[in-house]
Image (cartoon, rainbow, N blue to C red):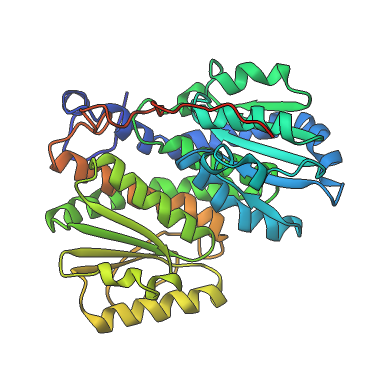
Amino acid sequence: MQSTLPGFTAAQLETRGAQWTAHEIAQQPAVWADVTQLVAAQRARLDAFLVPLLLNPSTRLVFTGAGTSSFIGDCLAPAVSAHLRRRVESLATTNIVSGPQRYLQRDLPTLLVSFARSGNSPESVATVELAERVVSNVHHLIITCNAEGELAKRASKLRSAHVLLLPDSINDRGFAMTSSFTSMVLVGGLIFGAIREQSVPALCRAADALLPKAWSLAQRLVGREFQRVVYLGSNELSSLASEAALKLLELTDGQVVALGQSTLGFRHGPKTIINNRSLVVLLLSNDAYVRAYDEDLLAELRRDARAGEILAVTAHEVKGGEQVKVEGLAGASDLELAMLYVIVAQTYALTQSLALGLTPDRPNAAGVVNRVVQGVTIHPWRE
């Protein structure tokens, strides 16, 4: 197993309990190419299943998942909606399970797209079962990394279902989802047309170039010993900000407070979190209209001079200030940028975890939180 994490040998990473997380972050450009080929190979079968459903304007398209898998749908929904010119929803399984009658509609034909690393999260399995009970005409597209997971196993018993099984290399062994997150974002984008197959080689090249810069940046940021970190972005990148914050919370076992928020929403109260021990990371859009709002906030935060550091992550040059530039993607969509931008957050979270003396592959030694959620009781539901 190889890693590009500077300053550590493979043996040292294994001793520190970081071998899987480091490897899975570093492997992303390679596995993106693999999953692109997988989708291309299965395109005919996918289209045979999906096209008749999507040709019906009444079909409700819902992305779902738990935790990081729910953020996959959150990132995809705005881009897929714009591409398909139809309403697309992202609903976390953790919401659906606690209130199926609030989120599922019996008489509305529904395509439920379930994202799942393991396919064993109790809420994800329960959501599929509830949809079967509640919705008269429901179809399932299950995108998972685990052939032995409950979702994959139960698919054959569903009325209408298609399973897309990703390579086992993407079934992240580390605690935090890294390559599984970006790979499922890519798969969802490819399947529903929000990412073009021709764009993927450029994304892989940009990621290869970004990784060493991200590791170097992470080491510098860790040296600043920030106590609070805020990620900000708009639309698809707002959802990515939530995932970036979750990575830091997970891998530092909550020792560093992290917040993900939308660019325009940040002024409405959350901005009070900033102090001189805070790092603010602004994920800048490639859309000129959206970017104008991002740049307004970036300039405002710099004028305020309250944060310990303000970092811009961008595909375009920013005047002055700390920044990390993703090369070669000035024309990329924000959904494509999300796959690159999250690498900055992943590498920082891993490096911070190691600096705190934690074991990133299993940062919560007490077992209060786990790789596959435990302690969930699925209560019987009656209409």
Query: In which quadrant will I find the C terminus?
Result: top right
Task: Work out whether 244 lies above or below 3.
Answer: below
The residue positioned 37% from the left and 51% from the top of the image is: 244
Q: Residue 251: which quarter of the image?
A: top left
The residue positioned 27% from the left and 46% from the top of the image is: 349
Left or right of 247? Residue 240 is: right
Task: Work out whether 170 lies above or below 73.
Answer: above
> Which residue appears farthest toward the bottom when viewing the image?
303
Viewer-closest of 194 and 301: 301
Left or right of 244? Residue 192 is: right
The residue positioned 78% from the left and 40% from the top of the image is: 106
The residue positioned 70% from the left and 49% from the top of the image is: 193
Residue 218 visible in the snapshot: yes
Query: In which quadrant will I find the N terminus?
Result: top left
Task: Work out whether 299 lies above or below 365.
Answer: below
Task: Give the image location of residue 21, x and y in percent.
Answer: 32, 33
Q: Residue 39: which quarter of the image?
A: top right
Task: Give the image location of residue 302, x and y in percent.
Answer: 27, 79
Task: Give the image location of residue 90, x and y in percent.
Answer: 60, 49
Residue 197 visible in the snapshot: no
